[in-house]
Amino acid sequence: MGLLSIIKKQKLKDKELRILILGLDNAGKTTIVKKIINEDVSKVSPTMGFQISTVLYKEYNLNIWDIGGQTSLRAFWGNYFDKTDAIMWVIDGLALERLNESFKELKEKILLQDRLVGIKVLILVNKVDLLDDYEEVEREVSSLLNVDEKIPANQQWKVLSISGKTGFGIIEALEWCIS
Ligand SMILES: Nc1nc2c(ncn2[C@@H]2O[C@H](COP(=O)(O)OP(=O)(O)OP(=O)(O)O)[C@@H](O)[C@H]2O)c(=O)[nH]1
Ligand SMILES: [Mg+2]
């Protein structure tokens, strides 16, 4: 291998990001990933383990780890934490009655984990294609997260609206991850 190709390979490695996509079951994680990698989103089924997808976005090689969110699988989330650069936490915008469950899992299984301290968390309110006023829901989610120290003060986080079905908000989400 020539020196130039070694340097090139190293450069690409430097720009490799590992992103975990997590959240409750049925939130729409797999659909979002499929949209990012340009696959058909009309057929998805619950993720029983995990699936890694790699996509080149700008000069970044994004390794996206899509992990099943069913209750029985949540105990295994910790197996995937090492070397994570960012977390996308997906919320089902059509199931706001599950917000408390979602926030509880976010806090206990993600934000309070030593291995994830300092990692940026992007909270995605998904399925906004079916919401009349997604901005209102986004505001509501943000304000709920601000109360009761649900998110530690030093945590870098942001709430964004997204639709895995239509692709709305996906570029903004990827931009935040690489920023
Ligand atoms: N309308 C609408 N439906 C969506 C959207 N994203 C996902 N869905 C639907 O929500 C359901 C669950 O989607 P999945 O992507 O399998 O959800 P998941 O978070 O990966 O679920 P687990 O793998 O069980 O953790 C499917 O019926 C999707 O078609 C969206 O943006 N809009
Ligand atoms: Mg899934």
Image: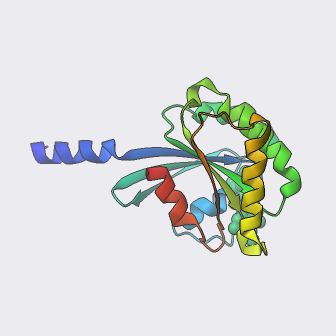
**Which of the pair 95/28 is nearer the observer?**
95
Please state if 164 lies on the left or on the right of 107 as rendered: left
Task: Give residue 16's position: percent from left, percent from top.
Answer: 38, 46
* Residue 178 in view in this figure: yes
Residue under the image location 50 percent in, 54 percent down: 176
Please state if 8 lies on the left or on the right of 121 as rendered: left
163 to 111, vertically: above or below? below
Residue under the image location 51 percent in, 37 percent down: 84
Task: Give residue 23's position: percent from left, percent from top.
Answer: 71, 47
Q: Residue furthest right?
A: 97
Rendering quarter of residue 72: top right
Task: Give residue 156's position: percent from left, percent from top.
Answer: 57, 41
Residue under the image location 77 percent in, 62 percent down: 137
13 to 124, vertically: above or below? above
**Which of the pair 85/150 is nearer the observer?**
150
* Residue 67 in view in this figure: no
Tally of numbered discs: 0
